[in-house]
Image (tube, helix red, strand yellow):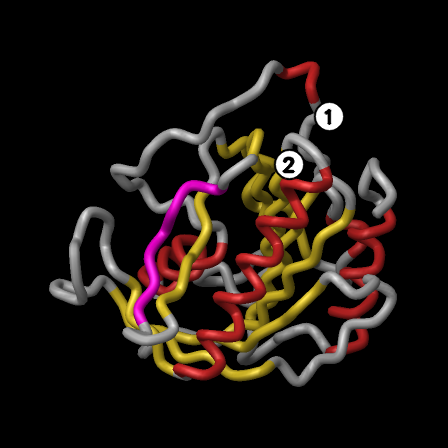
Amino acid sequence: MRRARAALLAILSATVAAALAAVAVPPASATPAAPGLLDARDLPSGFRLVVPPTTIADPTVLVTDALACTQRLQPVAGAVDGSLAQFTPGGATNALPSVTELVITYTDAAAATTSFAQRRTSHGARLRCRTVTLLPPGTPGPASPTTTVSYTKATVRFRGLGPSWFAERSGTAGTIPYTALTFRSGPYVVGLTFSAGPGALKPAVLRRLAVEARHRLRTAP
């Protein structure tokens, strides 16, 4: 199941090592650093921080081809950097169940809005395709795919996030599926990933965590 954790982080945090063009980074004073939103006290008893907030200098995003039903990681236009953290219960094996948080900071709210719209378009394409092949960096076509992912609409209805959010349920063969929530607020796009399967958090908890994360953003939408 170590491969399951690796696949989860690769797909959802988009931090797979790849020969991708670097994202242009403006001066540090141009925008605040990406905030860490959740801590172990927000989660049910027993959860602990297993991946401390880690800066991602060149964040990437999954871009989906609606016709070919393939997707690849591409640099995030307008991004300054990102911050990744993960929580699991103490003593949990294989990093499951888990909550993974990814916060991407943009140069301004307009850049975040544009990026979120692109993400939502890819989300719609994934739902229509239902099964999507993740292509490795540098490949011109679907040869040598790294993994195939299935996507369905998430059953959890997230409230209190405003209009800029979407969620999907995803899984790869041989791994435990997860619910991935993405929302935008101000110059930030946030991804919260909740593993499914044994020990998974209940929908009410997922909704509460999402609202708490949004409230802690340093900039109002």
Q: Residues within 10 Å of mark 2 (few under 14, many from 20)?
A: many
Main SS of residues in magenta: strand
Q: Magenta span covers which residues?
A: 70-76
Residue located at (38% from left, 47% from top): 74
Amino acid under disc 2: Thr
Query: What numbered label is drawn on residue 105?
Result: 2
Q: Secondary structure at mark 1?
A: loop
Residue 60 visible, this orientation: yes
Q: Which disc, if any, is residue 55?
A: none
Question: Most extreme residue toward the left, as rendered?
Answer: 143
Q: Residue at x 50, y 34 (%)?
A: 56
Q: CA distance from mark 2 to mark 1?
A: 8 Å
Residue 10 at what x, y percent from top left? 39, 53
Label number found at residue 32: 1
Residue 123 pos. (x, y %): 52, 69
Answer with the quarter of the image where residue 1 lies: bottom left
Q: Quick check: 134 left or right of 175?
A: left
Q: Position of residue 145 (x, y in %)?
A: 19, 65
Tell me if 178 is positioned left or right of 138 in this view.
right
Q: Look at label 1 and name its amino acid.
A: Pro
Q: Earlier in the sequence, mark 2 or mark 1?
A: 1
Q: Is residue 121 above or below residue 184?
A: below
**In front of the other: 50 or 159:** 159
